[in-house]
Image (spheres, rainbow, N blue to C red):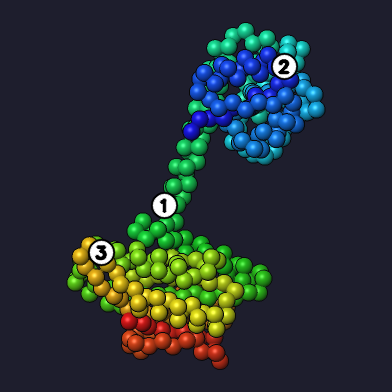
Amino acid sequence: MREIILIIDDEQDIVNLLSNLLKNEGYQIVTASNGREGIERFQEFDPGLIITDIRMPVMDGIEVLREVKTKEANTDVIILTGHSDEATAIDCLRHGAYDYFRKPLEDIDVLLNAVHRVIEKRKLEISNRCLIQQLEELSIKDPLTGLYNYRYLQNCLDQEIELSNRYGRTFFVLVLDIDQFKNINETHGHLFGDHVLTSLSGVIQSELRASDRIFRYGGEEFLIIMNEISKEEIAGVIERLMTRIHNYSFTYEDRHDKISVSMGGAFYPQDALDKTDLIKAANKSLAKAKDAGKHRNEPPPTNSNDPSNATTN
């Protein structure tokens, strides 16, 4: 994809000169004859570089620079100026312009080199931002399933508790555990087990609301945070999950199998007043579900804050 350069100048000769030169360098060129038109083009095309004259009708280059920097766009600005405007151009540098050049444009190669440097800088900045984003994702995501990890879960629980205390709302933590997962690995191998974990992640996510957050809590355990949800709604979520997982066949290469899961959960602040006790309450509920055995589906009791204990096979 070609980089876009926006040229803003009321002198058509300058526009034509720069357009032809920069097109020959492989850039896509957009032009405007005044600052206001230039801002419209900027918003429409999101150029990597703007080359603008200072003195223009309607809106001058200084106003263009201020507008671009206000938007916090990843767009650099090169200023074109007459000899008498050099002090103004220097002031523009202080306000974020990348460089300035005096008219008439006698040394075109110097200008072209500046343009190339701007575009390379932009590419490097975009690449660095992508790399930082990837590193941030790696720090909070489980590498196998792509779900949020235990570390990020702790931060999210702190945030949810703070919001709950501030606004007086509740949230629910649901823990889901794969029954006898060790047997799955021993029977079909660890690659099949990894496939089960990855596929189950997608199955669970497909039954949740957009606002719900799912984490890989342990080896074969998943944890879901659901805010502003009633016990009746939780029962519905659990019923859908149990039905979907019960009917789902996991297939990897030539191997096929089904699994069973157990679930348990707890409300904040009804069942616990801090995240440690909240997780303990949810795990206690999960343990009750496992003790109850398979082939059970017990919805959340309507006369208690104790969340559901459920298993499915």
| Residue 72 drawn above or below residue 199 | above
Name the residue type under label 3.
Tyr
Name the residue type under label 1.
Leu
Residue matched to label 1: 138
| Residue 146 drawn above or below residue 75 | below
The reply, left or right, for residue 277 in relation to residue 6 is left
Q: Secondary structure at mark 2?
A: loop
Any part of residue 46 in sight: yes
Residue matched to label 2: 11
Count neighbours of disc 1 (C-alpha within 10 A) and say few if under 14, some if 14 to 19, many if 20 or more.
Answer: some
The CA distance from mark 3 to mark 1 is 26 Å
Q: What residue lies at 64% left-to-right and 16% top-to-bottom?
A: 16
The reply, left or right, for residue 39 in relation to residue 132 is right
The CA distance from mark 3 to mark 2 is 66 Å
Labels 3 & 2 near each other (Cβ < 8 A): no
| Residue 215 drawn above or below residue 72 | below
Question: In the rendering, at what x and y percent does residue 245 appear?
Answer: 37, 75
Residue matched to label 3: 252
Question: In the rendering, at what x and y percent does residue 258 appear?
Answer: 29, 75
Q: What residue lies at 60% left-to-right and 19% top-to-bottom?
A: 19
* Quadrant assignment, res 47: top right
Q: Secondary structure at mark 1?
A: helix
Viewer-side label of 1, 2:
2
Q: Secondary structure at mark 3?
A: strand
Any part of residue 285 in sight: no
Labels 3 & 1 near each other (Cβ < 8 A): no
